Image (cartoon, rainbow, N blue to C red):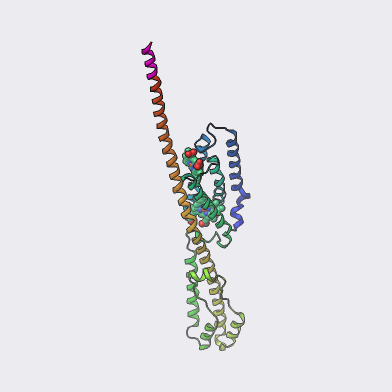
Amino acid sequence: MSQDSFIAYRHHRWFWITGLVLAGLTGWYFSEEPLGGRNGGTTFGYTVGALSAILIGYLMWFGVRKRSYRSKITTLQGWLSAHVWIGVGLAYLVLLHSGFQIGINVHTLAYGLMLVTIASGIWGAANYRIVPYQTPSNRGGASLGTLLDQIEQVGREIAELAQGKSPSTAALLKKLNTGTVPSVWAVLLKPRREVVLSVANAAAAIQELPEVEVEAGHKLVELIDRRLELLHKLKREMRAQALLKIWLYFHIPIAFGTVVAVLIHIFVVLYYRDVSDELLNLFSCVSCHGVQEAGDKGAGGI
Ligand code: HEM
Ligand code: HEM
């Protein structure tokens, strides 16, 4: 899956869906002139706030979805496309919700954290070329294990074939680097260091073999070539997985931070709404009693 394919998935389907929903809500936003001005506490504000919270929940669900063993690459591609476009759209949606009001408070903290999550998401998506999405290990698969098994198997075949041969065959193995399984640090810090089979070296080493071992020599060179190819794939896979992990170590905690801040925001606004409702009731009771008492006094005075 290329970087373009999840952004442009099905003719930019998610870009258009997000854009149309935002355009519709913008129309609704400007069609009303609520008393007290546009803010998160109007009917529109509550509706869009709830929608934003649900969408954040949906984006969080992606972590579960992508690890589901039933997920197919194509459905995951759609999910990632929706994730990216809905994520970007939220930056504007929440502004509609708050009536474009932001201050220095816990509400804006939720918005700020969400913006950082979105920015990190955009950075991750932009760098996705180096983190191929289809890597099965990214989806909890066993591609690394499979590659390691294959490398081990080829190594065994090389050892078996070289057994009982003349010192020239041992010299051939020494001359042609059969490669080693790299460490994670090596693949991250020295991504360009590749061991490749030198055809000239292989030809020279085979020429030095006794006649009876030439055929085995050719087979050995083939196996070494195969092993190096597998090691190359392993290195790419390890690098992709490590880079994705490093980036996710940033994206995921901030996403969770956003959720916590949103929950606090919702709790605070709903709690204070109840408190202010109670105060309003109290005040209206006091003024009501006041009027009643004045009425009673007036009536008594007549
Ligand atoms: C069920 C979901 C939500 C509800 C019920 C809700 C409710 C509210 C209410 C009542 C206000 C007005 C507060 C006031 O004027 O004092 C408000 C403002 C605001 N909300 Fe929400 N909200 C929700 C979701 C969100 C989400 C998901 C975010 C951001 C990630 C967010 C960010 C803000 C911001 C930035 C303000 C403006 C604060 C200010 O005026 O300084 N809200 N919200
Ligand atoms: C409020 C906004 C966002 C939230 C809450 C959020 C949350 C998440 C979560 C929970 C994951 C799953 C990570 C895992 O468990 O492995 C994820 C992955 C990802 N997100 Fe976001 N995200 C947001 C916005 C964005 C945006 C705006 C973009 C891109 C423009 C983006 C791009 C990605 C990518 C590329 C992945 C990795 C997919 C993969 O591992 O294959 N995210 N996000």
- Confirm whether the magenta stretch covers residue 18: no
Q: Which residues are magenta?
A: 293-301
Residue at 40% from the left image edge and 32% from the top image edge: 279
Reply above or below: 138 against 234: above
Q: Is residue 264 left or right of residue 77?
A: left
Q: Residue at x 51, y 85 (%)?
A: 170
Q: In terms of image quadrants, where is residue 3?
A: bottom right
Q: Is residue 68 visible?
A: no
35 or 253: nearer the viewer: 35
Residue at x-position 55% and y-position 85%: 213
Q: Is residue 294 magenta?
A: yes
In the displayed structure, 17 sits above or below 221; it is above
Q: Is residue 162 visible?
A: yes
Counting from the top left corner in percent of width and height, residue 210 is at: 56, 89
Farthest residue in the top direction?
302
Q: How many marks?
A: 0
Q: Quadrant of the N terminus?
A: bottom right
Q: Main secondary structure of the magenta part?
A: helix
